[in-house]
């Protein structure tokens, strides 16, 4: 179990516990944000694409996944849509999990999932594809998509910047 969820479970048992984020006291809102990404046909043996998503709770990573897609996508947009769909399923599960914990009355706002592919975002906004309103797929610039390291190798500086964006920090091994 993630340390964040362990904290949430114990917070549920007490009326005088507030959610703390980055050392700031008094943050009572729970905010879940998702990021999804895909790299198109990265496996040259079977032409499958790589999917990745990461979810943060008030800025700290609580759920992430990197996996090869089950089907062969015919385009970058299709690969990104498959990744966003996988992330949306996780978002619904997280939403239900947080509601079941009763840490907050309910998670009333849709969970935002950021994707860097305009075509996948447009497809996800089709009413038939997105009727319940549990999630909202939003466009984000590629350089700001923190799910990027889950789908492809990145330069160390960029990888560390994305890691810092989801609450992870590298420790200096020499200290």
Image (cartoon, rainbow, N blue to C red):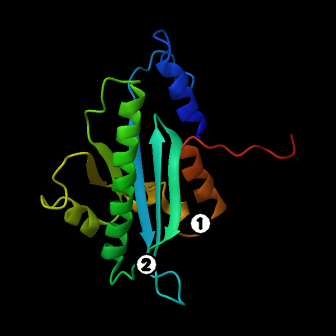
The answer to whether residue 21 shows anywhere in this view is: no
Q: Is residue 94 left or right of residue 6?
A: left
Asked if residue 75 is positioned above or below residue 100 in the image, the reply reads below
> Does the image show residue 125?
yes
| Residue ranking furthest to the bottom | 45
Residue 171 lies, in percent from the top left, at 75, 43
Residue visible at 19% across and 56% down?
Answer: 130
* Residue where numbered disc 2 is placed: 40
Q: Which residue is drawn at 23% across and 61% down?
A: 124
- Give residue 143's quadrant in the image: bottom left
Could you tell me which secondary element the residue under label 1 belongs to?
loop
SS class of the residue under badge 2? loop
Which residue position is annotated with label 1? Answer: 154
x and y, in percent, of residue 30 in the image: 40, 29
Residue that sits furthest to the top in the current view: 16
| Residue 21 coordinates in the image, percent (x, y) | 52, 27
Give the CA separation, mark 2 to mark 1: 16 Å
The correct choice, above or below, for 115 with respect to 11 in the image is: below
């Amino acid at each position: 179990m993630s340390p964040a969820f362990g904290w949430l479970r114990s917070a549920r048992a007490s009326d005088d516990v507030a959610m703390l984020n980055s050392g700031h006291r008094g943050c009572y809102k729970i905010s879940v944000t998702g990021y999804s990404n895909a790299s198109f046909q990265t496996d040259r043996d079977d032409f499958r694409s790589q999917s990745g998503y990461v979810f943060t709770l008030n800025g700290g990573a609580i759920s992430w996944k990197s996996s090869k897609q089950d089907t062969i996508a015919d385009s970058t947009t299709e690969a990104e849509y498959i990744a966003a769909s996988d992330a949306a399923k996780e978002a619904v599960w997280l939403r239900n999990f947080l509601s079941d914990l009763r840490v907050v009355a309910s998670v009333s706002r849709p969970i935002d999932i950021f994707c860097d592919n305009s075509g996948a975002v447009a497809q996800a906004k089709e009413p038939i594809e997105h009727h319940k309103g549990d999630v909202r797929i939003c466009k984000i610039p590629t350089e700001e998509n923190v799910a990027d390291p889950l789908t492809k190798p990145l330069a160390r500086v960029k990888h560390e910047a994305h890691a810092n964006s989801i609450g992870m920090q590298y420790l200096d091994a020499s200290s």
